[in-house]
Image (tube, rainbow, N blue to C red):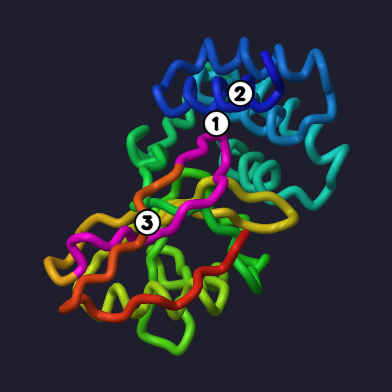
Amino acid sequence: MSDANLAQKAINHALSGEWEDAVKTNLEILEKNKTDIDALNRLARAYSELGQIKNARNTAKKVLKIDSSDPIAQKSLEKWKNLKEGESSHSHLSRPDQFLEEPGKTKIIKLMHVNKTVLSKVDAGDKVNINSHSHRISITTTEGKKIGRLPDDLSAHLKKLIKYGNEYEAIIKSLNKDGVTILIRETKRSKHLANIPSFSSEKIEYVSFTPPELVHGTDTPDTSTTEDSE
């Protein structure tokens, strides 16, 4: 199995709460590459969910030996400092179906101008807010702290769709020292945009698809702003 497929398998185990399987899969990845930070962070979290706090802390410390500024490991150690062996961190993950990508309805995007001081306060799977009230769409925590913003072209495109009645939600798909990637999902489509998919075809993480072409009807609002190409 390829490294990418193993990584997706490990993520799926975590989303399903299959923590023992998550441990096994991440260990399998680390047999190939013992410095894989993503696998180490996933392994640390799986250990914490199983109440193996010592293993969780030791694994997070391995991450910090590789990258002393890794926000996930730093946040994890802070969260677990008062836990005793046998106690679980009991993370509240998003529903697994929220991570599924759908043709025309979802888009994975890397945020721009990320506020790195906020990274230690968020995790992969966290819901985030889409703030479309300013000139550019910004992404904030549920407490209102700005995480980053969407590229200009995508901001303009989404603002038009939102103006005509579409609604969207977003979650953090991944984060590391290099940035934050989110998944945006269309949750409601306006009747005025019934035949217009929110997002055009492009290659996305783990899953590739080719959604229907953008359809313009005679009474359809103009939503032709070019999207940012990742």
Contact (Cβ within 8 Å) of mark 2 with mark 1: yes
Measured along the vertical axis of the image, is residue 86 above or below residue 79?
A: above
* Mark 3 or mark 2: whose residue is earlier in sequence: 2
Horizontal relation, residue 170 to residue 11: left or right: left
Q: Which mark is residue 53?
A: 2
**Pointer 1: what residue?**
83
Please give the label number shown on residue 93: none
Q: Quadrant of residue 143?
A: bottom left
- The CA span between labels 3 and 1 is 52 Å
Q: Position of residue 22 (x, y in %)?
A: 55, 17
Q: Nearer the viewer, mark 3 or mark 2?
A: 3
Which kind of residue does numbered mark 1 sit on?
Answer: Leu
Res. 84 in view:
no
Question: Which residue: 69% across, 41% down?
Answer: 73
Q: Which residues lie in the magenta part?
A: 193-209
Instruction: Name the quadrant containing residue 37.
Output: top right
Q: Outermost residue, bottom direction?
A: 135
| Left or right: residue 66 compared with residue 113 | right
Residue extending furthest toward the left: 191
Specify whether residue 195 is painted magenta: yes
> Which of the marked residues, 2 or 1, is nearer the chain's N terminus?
2
- From the image, give the main secondary structure of the stretch colored magenta: loop
Residue 104 seen:
yes
Q: What amino acid is at disc 2?
A: Ile
How many neighbours does mark 2 have within 10 angstroms: few (below 14), some (14-19), or many (20 or more)? Answer: many
Q: Residue under label 3, please give it.
A: 213
